[in-house]
Image (cartoon, helix red, strand yellow):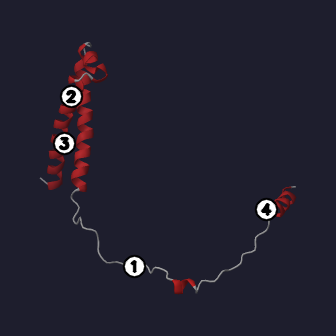
Amino acid sequence: MPELVRLYIRNVIFGAGLSALFVGLLLGFDVAHLRHLILGSDIGYIAVTLLFVFNTVVFAGVQFAIAVMNMAEDQTPPGGGKRDAIPSHHMAAELIAIPVPVRSESRARRQLGRTLR
């Protein structure tokens, strides 16, 4: 059996255990009166089964995602690389200001008004 399939099965089993614990705690602490609702219904077992199954899907998916992300090869940050030069005072002297003509806002609005008519 491939390693990835074994990893997935292991995480589904672990997720089912977490789900059973979670559903047990939900019912044990009677969160939102779920225990009262389930025990007061003649088909409460369906609710418990659905809680267990859907929480198993969630917890197994999270466990599998964590396991896959932890499979990364290298955890150390890369060294070296390109270093951009930090501008110094002698480079600032080389910068040249370029004037850009700007029309006033009121003149631009008047021209826009003429083109819309």
Task: Tell me which label, 2 or 3, sits earlier in the chain.
Answer: 3
Q: Nearer the viewer, residue 70 or 115?
A: 70
Residue type at tag 2: Leu
Pointer 3 residue: 12
Task: Tell me which label, 2 or 4, sits earlier in the chain.
Answer: 2
Pointer 4 residue: 105
- Secondary element at tag 1: loop
Mark number displayed over residue 25: 2
Marker count (numbered): 4
Q: Nearer the viewer, residue 79 or 96?
A: 96
Residue at image x 46%, y 79%? Answer: 86
Task: Tell me which label, 1 or 4, sits earlier in the chain.
Answer: 1
Q: CA distance from mark 2 to mark 3?
A: 20 Å
- As drawn, the residue found furthest toward the left would be 1
| Front tag of 2 and 3 | 2
3 sits to left or right of 68: left
- Secondary element at tag 3: helix
